[in-house]
């Protein structure tokens, strides 16, 4: 319990003024523009956009600037802002199969239609600090361009499904639950779990995904495919009655392929874990796919014993705006609570000493 | 609409500049900024789920008795209003031809070129495996 | 198709404020300042209230015909719903049985619908005497153009309290509220 106390207004005003100055930093240095953040800290922007659950790179960049680079605080700002906007409706599900590919790799097939397309990746860099970036350097040379563009790339899971080796995701147009409309409730179906994880904290999902690989939840995953690029977004406004294309959105998708021993109803085959994140964020898409597969344990008749297999554990704790709210609320005045604790401990101590002197 | 949705207000204005001014329009709704909930499919091909909200701007106008509508991703109010006005004007037989020639087609070409450049860059990063069959 | 409020945000806010004021002072006649060009037979006040209150998450029932339906759908995004499930309802003519609207539940009485009931005229004059929360002594309200038997039908819902139906009477640009807690006494 916490009680409201008055008297801090002047101090708060002064603290905010100092915060504003601290955010700006040394005024002798030029101020960062939002466009610079959007362009040059692109992955930080994408992370804030995903965790803020509001896909808008300009807003995410502004939030990062205001939050002094604190990604959780920035996600919080974005979540707060989105509540001021009306909801126009739902888009049609994006077709990741028709993605304009920037990156697409598979660790299950070397030669697959469309090939292994590396795209703008940190993989194969040597992780050596590049001091040339510290000096204001020259613009990098433009990247190479092939004569022909990349061809259409079928999804790896399609290849496995054609052989009957992959448990299909039943095609369905069932209306999914929406976390932004109804609070989280259990049992949570897979659609709700995916929504919660797509906006969940990258670090939390990464750790949980890692735990499934280390034996907390029996997983033996392969990266069936990771792809990143633009998908077109379509809506169907009721006043028009047909779908219109409203623009492109960069998303990252990961299909994890896992073994499944089979059961009375289903033969042994592969099953999948799925990760989809707005923006470029491969690590999160992979972690999400691992945890998605772990959370499917009960439906596949597997024993669920590990944290990553517990929907309550994962979903109640993956949201960093919620988590930070409850952890940081401990900073609020708890004077009355603590007074009662003090009285109690004094009374118990007095009894303890009294018993010893008897 | 797909082409107008991918062209910012500046690009739309620049392409409209070579044409006589569009007839005046009245705003029926918007331009206003709001959210659409993006959806994906489980496993890429299964049942839909809600992925994330995204900002969008929509506008509906009336021009000489014709309704024009636009919804575009992002927060460009001027883009949505211009796109809605162009949508209305495209329904006019007299305006359709010049608009297609001077606005829609040049924008479509520029967008296709940008898409193609990305695809060619991606293709340049495709791994060319060497076959090891002849090694002993 | 006609536009909604001149300024959607300010129009919705001022209409919301006016409705709040009306519901806090049952029977008091409030004139709405921002009125949209609502198509007939929608009264401007009913149109303003709908624009302020309804969105894609509120089912809306009305009897205002196709043109008004298109206008309401376009500007509010609210889907049409049967009286039993609608959160808001607009009756431009005689409403369906009041007990047939959503009245909420004992656990969630706030789920009861709000009915915007269009009438011919509202006047602060002899007719009804209203009492209840929000009224210090009595408020006089004269309503013209109501279907016969309205007062008795509404009074019958009183037994279901806290469940019930909140009604906002609309006449041109005027509104007056009859929340479920207000009692109506008809002067002989």
Image: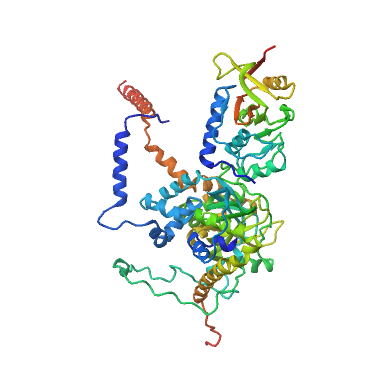
Identify the residue at image location x=60%, y=38%: C54
Q: Quadrant of the C terminus of chain A?
A: top left
Q: Position of residue C27 (x, y in %)?
A: 60, 21
Which quadrant holds residue C188? top right
Q: Position of residue B110 (x, y in %)?
A: 53, 70
* Location of residue A3 with respect to A295 vertically, above or below: above
Q: Is residue C180 visible?
A: no
Q: Position of residue A357 (x, y in %)?
A: 30, 22
Which quadrant holds residue A121? bottom left
Closer to the camera in the image, A303 or B79: B79
Left or right, C185 with respect to A83, comes to right
* Location of residue A199 with respect to C36 vertically, above or below: below
Colour scheme used in the picture? rainbow
Q: Is residue B60 visible?
A: yes
Identify the residue at image location x=54%, y=30%: C18
Q: Quadrant of the N terminus of chain A?
A: top left
* Location of residue B44 with respect to B58 vertically, above or below: below
Question: Which residue lies most toward the top here?
Answer: C188
Q: Position of residue A8 (x, y in %)?
A: 32, 33
Identify the residue at image location x=68%, y=53%: A241
Closer to the camera in the image, C136 or A223: C136
* Labels in figure, total: 0
Which quadrant holds residue A329? top left
């Amino acid at each position: 319990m916490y009680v409201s106390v008055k008297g801090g207004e002047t101090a708060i005003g002064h603290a905010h003024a100092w915060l504003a100055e601290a955010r700006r930093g040394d005024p002798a240095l030029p101020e960062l523009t939002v466009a610079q953040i959007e362009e040059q800290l692109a992955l930080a922007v994408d992370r804030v956009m995903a965790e803020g659950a509001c896909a808008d790179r300009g807003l995410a960049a502004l939030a990062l600037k205001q939050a002094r680079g604190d990604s959780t605080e920035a996600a919080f700002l974005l979540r707060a802002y989105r509540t001021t906007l009306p909801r126009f409706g739902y888009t049609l599900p994006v077709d990741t199969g028709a993605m304009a590919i920037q990156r697409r790799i598979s660790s299950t097939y070397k030669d697959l239609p469309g090939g292994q397309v590396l795209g703008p990746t940190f993989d194969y860099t040597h992780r050596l600090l590049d001091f040339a970036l510290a000096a204001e350097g020259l613009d990098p040379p433009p990247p190479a361009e092939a004569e022909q563009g990349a061809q259409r790339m079928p999804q790896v899971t399609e290849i496995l499904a054609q052989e009957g080796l992959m448990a299909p995701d039943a095609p369905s147009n069932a209306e999914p639950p929406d976390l932004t409309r109804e609070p989280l409730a259990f049992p949570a179906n897979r659609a709700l779990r995916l929504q919660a994880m797509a906006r969940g904290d990258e670090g939390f999902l990464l750790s949980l995904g890692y735990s499934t690989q280390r034996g907390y939840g029996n997983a033996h995953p392969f990266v069936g495919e990771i792809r990143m690029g633009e998908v077109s977004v379509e809506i169907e406004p009721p006043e028009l009655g047909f779908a219109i294309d409203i623009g492109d959105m960069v998303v990252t998708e990961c299909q994890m392929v896992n073994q499944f021993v089979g059961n009375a109803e289903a033969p042994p085959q592969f099953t999948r874990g799925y990760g989809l994140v707005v923006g470029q964020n491969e690590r999160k898409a992979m972690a999400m796919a691992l945890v998605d597969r772990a959370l499917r344990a009960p439906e596949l008749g597997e024993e669920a014993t590990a944290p990553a297999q517990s929907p309550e554990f994962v979903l109640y704790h993956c949201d960093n705006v919620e988590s930070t709210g409850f952890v940081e609320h401990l900073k609020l005045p708890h004077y009355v609570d603590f007074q009662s604790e003090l009285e109690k401990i004094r009374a118990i101590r007095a009894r303890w000493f009294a018993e010893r002197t008897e | 609409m797909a082409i107008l949705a991918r062209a910012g207000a500046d690009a739309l204005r620049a392409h409209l500049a070579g044409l006589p001014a569009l007839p005046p329009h009245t705003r029926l709704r918007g331009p206003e900024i709001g959210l659409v909930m993006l959806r994906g499919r489980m496993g890429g091909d299964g049942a839909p789920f809600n992925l994330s909200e995204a900002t969008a701007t929509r506008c509906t106008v009336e021009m000489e008795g014709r309704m024009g509508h636009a919804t575009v991703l992002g927060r460009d109010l001027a883009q949505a209003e211009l796109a809605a006005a162009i949508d209305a004007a495209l329904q006019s037989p007299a305006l359709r031809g010049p608009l297609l020639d001077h606005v829609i087609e040049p924008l479509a070409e520029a967008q296709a070129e940008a898409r193609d450049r990305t695809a060619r860059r991606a293709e340049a990063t495709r791994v060319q495996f060497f076959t090891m069959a002849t090694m002993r | 198709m006609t536009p909604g409020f001149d300024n959607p945000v300010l129009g919705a806010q001022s209409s919301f404020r006016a409705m709040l004021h009306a519901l806090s002072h049952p029977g008091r006649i409030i004139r709405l300042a921002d009125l949209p060009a609502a198509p007939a037979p929608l009264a401007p006040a009913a149109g303003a209230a709908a624009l302020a209150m309804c969105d894609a998450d509120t089912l809306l029932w009305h009897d205002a015909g196709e043109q008004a339906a298109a206008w309401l759908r376009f500007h509010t995004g609210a889907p049409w719903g049967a009286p039993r499930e609608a959160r808001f309802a607009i009756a431009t003519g005689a409403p369906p049985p009041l007990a047939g609207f959503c009245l909420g539940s004992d656990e969630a009485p706030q789920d009861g619908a709000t009915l915007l009931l269009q009438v011919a005229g509202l006047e602060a004059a002899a007719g009804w005497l209203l009492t209840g929360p929000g009224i210090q002594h009595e408020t006089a309200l004269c309503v013209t153009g109501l279907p016969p038997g309205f007062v008795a039908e509404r009074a019958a819902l009183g037994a279901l309290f806290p469940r019930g139906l909140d009604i906002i009477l609309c006449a041109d640009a005027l509104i007056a509220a009859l929340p479920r807690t207000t009692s109506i006494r008809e002067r002989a």
